[in-house]
Structures are given as C-alpha cells and as structure tokens.
Image: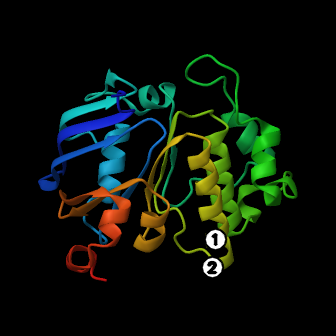
Amino acid sequence: MSTPFIEAHDLQAWYGSSHALRGVALQLQPGETLGLLGRNGMGKSTLLRTLLGHVKQRSGQIRIGGRDLSRGKPYEAARLGLAYVPEGRGIFPNLTVREHLVMAAGPGPDGRGREWTFERTLQTFPRLAERLGHLGSQLSGGEQQMLSIGRALMTHPRAIILDEATEGLAPLIVDEIWHVIAKIRSAGISTLVVDRNYRRVLAHTDHAVVLEKGRVVLAGDSSALSADHQGLSKFLGV
C-alpha cells in the first residue's frame, strides 16, 4: 500500500484553554480526494491549520509526504508540495492577477518541471486571462477564489487543501469551482476539501470525514456516507 501524503494520528489542539481537537486521525492517500465535513465550530478549519503547522498548541503525530512534521513549520509543509487555498481566499489587494500567479510559480517539490504552467492555469481559468492587469481588490469574490486556486496550482503541488471552497459565491460560480475541483482530481493531485454543501463534497470525493466537537464521528467511502442519512442528519443537521 502506498504511503499517505497526509497522515495524522491522535491529533490534539488547543486555543488557550479551549480543547479544539480531540484525538483526530485521518489519511489522505496520493491521488485521493478527501472531504472534511461538519457544522460550524466543529473543528474543521482548526484541523486544517493544525496540519499546516499554524496552530502552535498541538500534540499527536503529523506526517506530510512521508516526513514527520508533528512540530513542523508551515513553510516545511509547502516545500513538501502541500498547497493551501484558505478560507477568505488570502488575495493581496495591491497585486495584479499576473503578479499573484508569477509570484507563486516554482519548480515543484520533487525537482521535476512544472505541470501547472502560467498558460495552463489561464486555460483552466479563462476569466483570469481577461483580468491579468486587475488588482486583487478589483476582482469579484468568484474571481478571487479562482485566483487563489490558480495561485496554489502554480506551486506545482502534490496535494492541495481547499478551505470553504465555494463559500459566499453565486450558483454559477459555485458550479465552475466544482468543475475545477474535478479537473484537479483527474490530474492526480491529492485534495482535501471543506465545503458546506455536503452533497457536492460527497459527489466529488473518494472518502470523507465528519467532525463533531473536535472528534471524528463518521469516516468512510463518500458513496457509503452519502447513503447514511441517519448519520448525516445527526451530525450535519440535514
């Protein structure tokens, strides 16, 4: 069996005296798409930030790309090929679309050539090609999300984390973002995706994990979880 690209065991995390994660375990296999579900405040973003090394009060084991990053820094995860599309998009208001993409370009973590070139990224997001000279502050929410994903892809990642992938976007843009996520999946990039629309998440992922108060309460094949109406109702309030 292949080595998971992301692997966490008995993950604990705190914000001050608040115990946010309680023994979380998960795996993201190479080429797999994993959904992370849960109601607001159940620990999803905390889990992502802990995996990336942003949460300082943590314990348990985290392995990224086969390396122990239990006490690792965010830049170490990035160097191993883990890209992050944050909730809120993280766009610089005073940089142009072109500058965002060129700034992120790199040779990739394994030293091979970049598969996600500037040209390929613009082909994936034609709307960005029309706005190369626009500042981040001049883009719509949907365009900012496309830019955030495009910027992550320009790093030539082995895996990508998308936190609240379609939050606050118009329905047509939501469809476009899920279409891009399907492209990323077909390209063989491991993907961990968080989104409030559990139906879309389960339809576009291989496996999924449900968090409740910082614990994993459901985990398995997305198709099986999709059929678990009782579990989804109990833990997602649907």
Q: Residue at x 79, y 38 (%)?
A: 118
Q: Residue at x 27, y 62 (%)?
A: 210
Instruction: Give the left or right position of residue 179, taking residue 59 as reference.
Output: right
Instruction: Give the left or right position of residue 124, taking residue 206 as reference.
Output: right
* Rendered image quadrant of residue 182: bottom right
Question: Above or below — where is 99 with respect to 207?
Answer: above
Number of disc labels: 2
Identity of the residue furthest to the top in this view: 111
The residue indicated by pointer 1 is: 175
Question: Above or below — where is 131 with respect to 84?
Answer: below
The residue indicated by pointer 2 is: 171
Q: Residue 14 versus residue 24: which sits nearer the camera?
A: 24
Q: Residue 21 versus residue 25: which sits nearer the camera?
A: 25
Q: Are marks 2 and 1 in contact (CB under 8 Å)?
A: yes
Q: Residue at x 62, y 34 (%)?
A: 155
Q: Secondary structure at mark 1?
A: helix
Question: As shown in the figure, which amino acid type bears the numbered disc 2?
Answer: Pro
Q: Residue 181 versus residue 127: which sits nearer the camera?
A: 181
Question: As shown in the figure, which amino acid type bears the numbered disc 1?
Answer: Asp
- Label 2 – label 1 distance at C-alpha: 6 Å
- Residue 86 visible (yes or no): yes
Q: Residue at x 80, y 48 (%)?
A: 122
* Rendered image quadrant of residue 115: top right
- Residue 91 visible (yes or no): no
How many other residues sit within 10 Å of disc 2, few (<14), some (14-19) or many (≥20)?
A: few
Q: Secondary structure at mark 2?
A: helix
How many other residues sit within 10 Å of disc 1, few (<14), some (14-19) or many (≥20)?
A: some
Relative image position of residue 168 (x, y in whole percent)? 55, 75
Relative image position of residue 74 (x, y in whole percent)? 41, 33
* Rendered image quadrant of residue 235: bottom left
